[in-house]
Amino acid sequence: MKANDSDKEKNEATFSGIIIKKKTASGSKSEHNAIFLQTTEKDYQLRRAGANAFADPGLQKWVGKKVIITGVLYGALLMISTIKKIP
């Protein structure tokens, strides 16, 4: 089942934190270094729609920066709608 735009808006959330890179899926065939948003509560793996899940140069450039991200949360995976650097 595909969500429509109004469903997406209802499920969007905004988080702030620092973009980090760390290992995920340890011990599996999918083990790799992924991009995460580190918040005070927990870390959320980040993904951009249509981007490669294992290597996204568009997200790589954000590593180490403080940001505000709006997106749709699927468990611990945050699908990014917008990302903005915090000065």
Image (cartoon, rainbow, N blue to C red):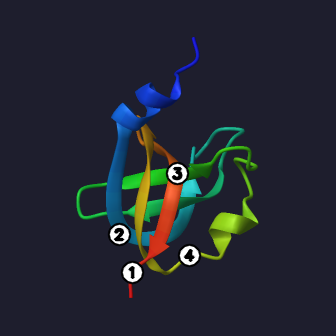
> What distance separates the C-alpha of mark 1 from that of mark 2?
9 Å
The mark closer to the camera, 4 or 3, is: 3
Mark 1: which secondary structure? Answer: loop
Q: Residues within 10 Å of mark 1 (few under 14, many from 20)?
A: few
> What distance separates the C-alpha of mark 2 from that of mark 4?
11 Å
Marked residue nearer the N-terminal end (2 or 3): 2
- Residue 58: x and y, percent? 70, 66
> What distance separates the C-alpha of mark 3 from that of mark 1?
16 Å
Marked residue nearer the N-terminal end (1 or 2): 2
Name the residue located 23 percent from the left edge and 56 percent from the top edge: 41
Mark 4: which secondary structure? Answer: loop
Residue 79 shown left or right of residue 56 in the figure: left
Mark 3: which secondary structure? Answer: strand
The residue identified by callout 3 is 81
- The amino acid at mark 3 is Ser
The residue closer to the viewer here, 42 or 58, is 58
Name the residue located 39 percent from the left edge and 88 percent from the top edge: 87
Q: Residues within 10 Å of mark 3 (few under 14, many from 20)?
A: some
- The amino acid at mark 1 is Ile
- The amino acid at mark 4 is Val
The residue identified by callout 1 is 86
- Residue 57: x and y, percent? 74, 67
Label placed on residue 17: 2
Mark 2: which secondary structure? Answer: strand
- The amino acid at mark 2 is Gly
> What distance separates the C-alpha of mark 1 from that of mark 4?
13 Å
> What distance separates the C-alpha of mark 2 from that of mark 3?
16 Å
The residue closer to the viewer here, 18 or 82, is 82
The residue identified by callout 4 is 63
